[in-house]
Image (cartoon, coloured by chain):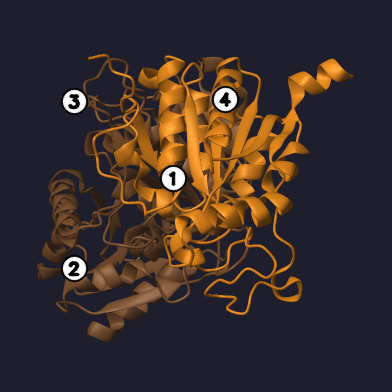
Chain colours: A orange, B brown
């Protein structure tokens, strides 16, 4: 019998701990497949965050380092600067990257560190039980803003891909989601492109993946997908936010 | 070998390069900024990597990443900056990574002063970060020792897969002294087959991590660390005794005050007062047994602990070692004021008078 589909060699046999309907599993698969298809798995070093994907070191079959909360871009800097020929990536959530690790991600992008960041934005702190994140939408409920986030209390949510795009060192930033097959395919294409640009030593590459958290959003997985499309994608527009190579051609 | 005149901080950087430091991640802070400055010029000349980090927090995490990938990594800072690095240091200890950290101490607390201080003893020896861990702490009292210890620190770190801190103070960092580039005895070092530097055909993936969700496994990990610390205690304790053979009054001091104490000893001896110096060189592991045995000697009547700290920090370890056998007095200043020879002489006489 012909094999039409099999688990990526970029993933281990470890059982995933993610909640039903969570997008981390899909995103892990896309990262793993991209590494394998580009022939980078044996050269890759991943850095995982503190948050829901804290155990990602158990799931990716490449070498992995577990960073302190928010510090993955600094850890990746230490790795990539001393291993410039290898593929280095960070895999971070929105609490990790946009809140406690805001300084580290901005400065890694500013320096044009030649690694790739996969930023999983689900607009909430998942692991700690659904607290407000810097990316939580106005009106969205969380355990630390139980009547919904307000501008007065917490300001407007941060659009990280757009912010990092203002830095010259960031050569490629794209926002994707994985709610359906078409978007999953787009997301994989973006992740592969980021890894390729990294290996071409073009600069810092950033893929923001809008993601659901059915458990902490209090929704079914399908409803969560719908909510993401209607609410998150409206505030966090999908598509290429910055591609220095294309921008240069247009000019 | 001919002696060369070197400034403490620049000598630290040069010593690290000679020890095969692959990468340095730092952030400016007085009085240690000459370390990153020197590294920025000379480390790349030797094929190494220099990055000026956005913060001390980032710098120590860059060290974590590079060390986790098998490199000889180092950072340096001064007291308030070392506070910021504590998060990274506990992760480095937890993940069992070798790393060298220099603390060119200044007075505190808070911003304190940029003048020399020793108020970071607790932070260095008790574990400034969370959890049960130990950092090997080497304390030089001149520029020669500083360059020797910095070079050896890389080997100690690699041997035990543990962070090693070299604590000097702003005086040693800023002063120029003649030094010799002496051969450092080589240690037999284990291979870094644990490093997460890419599988490259390896049949398993390497993971650098300090997270153990299963309490039993975390307990076991801590036990393993404890065994390693016991090994360090067994192998690495160092101290120096000066004229302690017949001493009635023993000064305990490390770093710069120990150096000032040498002059005080001469003056006291000239007056016929039998004074000696006990100088811990490893602050952790502390030379507890040696000090306990010294305190047990009949000729020793009293101790005088001298530190650049308001009420003393190392004095706690001195008390634990002496175990009440003999009285311990204290002389110290914080905030960048150094104890003088005159003060030491006066305090030594007073301490002796009280027991006679």
Instruction: Using the numbered discs, state the Cα–Cα distance from disc 2 to disc 3 in whole angstroms.
Output: 32 Å
Q: Nearer the viewer, residue B129 or A62?
A: A62
Residue assigned mark 4: A189
Residue assigned mark 1: A24
x 35%, y 19%: residue:
A42
Q: Are marks 2 and 1 on the same chain?
A: no
| Crowd rating for badge 4 (residues with CA inside 10 Å; few <14, some 14–19, many 20+) | some
Instruction: Using the numbered discs, state the Cα–Cα distance from disc 1 to disc 4 in whole angstroms.
Output: 17 Å
Left or right: where B291 falls relative to B72: left
x 41%, y 48%: residue:
A53
Secondary structure of the residue carrying numbered label 4: helix
Residue assigned mark 3: B188
Instruction: Using the numbered discs, state the Cα–Cα distance from disc 2 to disc 1 in whole angstroms.
Output: 54 Å
Determine whether B89 is above or below A74 in the image. below
Secondary structure of the residue carrying numbered label 2: helix
Residue assigned mark 2: B321
| Crowd rating for badge 1 (residues with CA inside 10 Å; few <14, some 14–19, many 20+) | many
**Residue B178 appears in view:** no
x 42%, y 73%: residue:
B331
- Chain bearing tag 3 is B
Left or right: where B310 falls relative to B273: right
Secondary structure of the residue carrying numbered label 3: loop
Determine whether B148 is above or below B231 in the image. above
Q: Nearer the viewer, residue B173 or B144?
A: B173
Left or right: where B346 falls relative to A138: left
| Crowd rating for badge 3 (residues with CA inside 10 Å; few <14, some 14–19, many 20+) | few
- The answer to whether the residue labelled 2 contacts the one labelled 4, judged by CB atoms less than 8 Å apart, is no
**Residue A199 appears in view:** yes
């Amino acid at each position: 019998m012909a094999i039409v589909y099999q688990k990526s060699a970029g993933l281990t046999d470890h059982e995933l701990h993610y909640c039903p309907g969570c997008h981390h599993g899909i995103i892990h698969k896309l990262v793993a497949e991209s590494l394998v298809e580009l022939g980078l798995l044996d050269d890759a070093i991943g850095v995982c965050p503190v948050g829901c994907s804290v155990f990602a070191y158990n799931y990716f079959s490449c070498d992995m380092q577990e960073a302190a909360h928010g510090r993955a871009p600094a850890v990746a800097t230490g790795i990539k600067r001393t291993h410039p020929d290898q593929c280095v990536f960070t895999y971070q959530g929105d609490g990790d990257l946009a809140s406690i690790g805001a300084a580290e991600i901005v400065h890694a992008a500013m320096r044009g560190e030649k690694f790739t960041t996969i930023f999983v934005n689900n607009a909430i702190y998942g692991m700690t039980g659904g607290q407000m994140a810097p990316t939580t939408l106005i009106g969205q409920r969380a355990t630390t803003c139980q009547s919904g986030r307000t501008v007065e209390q917490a300001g407007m949510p941060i659009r990280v891909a757009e912010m990092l795009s203002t830095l010259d060192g960031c050569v490629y930033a794209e926002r994707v989601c994985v709610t359906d097959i078409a978007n999953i395919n787009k997301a994989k294409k973006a992740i592969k492109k980021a890894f390729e640009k990294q290996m071409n030593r073009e600069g810092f590459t950033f893929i923001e993946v809008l993601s659901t958290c059915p458990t902490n959003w209090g929704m079914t997985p399908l409803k969560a997908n719908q909510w993401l499309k209607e609410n998150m994608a409206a505030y966090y527009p999908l598509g290429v936010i910055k591609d220095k190579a294309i921008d240069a051609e247009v000019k | 070998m001919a002696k060369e005149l070197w400034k403490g901080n620049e000598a630290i950087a040069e010593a690290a390069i000679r020890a095969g430091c692959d990468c340095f991640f730092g952030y400016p802070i007085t009085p240690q900024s000459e370390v990153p400055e020197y590294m920025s010029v000379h480390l790349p000349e030797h094929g190494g990597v220099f990055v000026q980090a956005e913060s001390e927090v980032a710098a120590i995490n860059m060290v974590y990443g590079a060390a986790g990938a098998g490199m000889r990594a180092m950072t340096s800072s001064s007291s308030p900056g070392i506070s910021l690095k504590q998060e990274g240091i506990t992760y480095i200890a937890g993940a069992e990574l070798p790393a060298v950290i220099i603390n060119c101490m200044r007075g505190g607390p808070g911003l304190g002063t940029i003048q020399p201080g020793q108020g970071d003893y607790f932070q260095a020896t008790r574990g400034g970060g969370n959890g049960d861990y130990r950092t090997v702490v080497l304390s030089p009292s001149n520029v020669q020792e500083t360059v020797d210890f910095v070079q050896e620190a890389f080997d100690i770190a690699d041997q035990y897969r543990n962070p090693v801190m070299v604590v000097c103070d702003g005086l040693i960092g800023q002063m120029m002294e003649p030094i010799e580039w002496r051969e450092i005895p080589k240690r037999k070092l284990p291979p870094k087959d644990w490093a997460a530097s890419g599988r490259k055909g390896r049949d398993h993936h390497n993971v650098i991590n300090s997270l153990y969700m299963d309490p039993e496994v975390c307990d076991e990990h801590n036990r393993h660390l404890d065994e390693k610390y016991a090994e360090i205690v067994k192998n690495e304790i160092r101290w120096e005794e000066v004229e302690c053979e017949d001493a009635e009054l023993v000064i305990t001091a490390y770093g710069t005050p120990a150096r000032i104490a040498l002059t005080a000893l001469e003056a006291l001896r000239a007056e016929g007062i039998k004074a000696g110096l006990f100088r811990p060189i490893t602050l952790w592991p502390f030379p507890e047994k040696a000090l306990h045995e010294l305190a047990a000697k009949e000729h020793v009547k009293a101790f005088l602990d001298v530190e650049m700290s308001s009420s003393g920090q190392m004095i706690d370890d001195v008390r634990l070692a002496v175990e009440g056998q003999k009285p311990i007095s204290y002389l110290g200043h914080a905030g960048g004021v150094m104890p003088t020879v005159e003060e030491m002489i006066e305090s030594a006489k007073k301490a002796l008078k009280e027991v006679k």
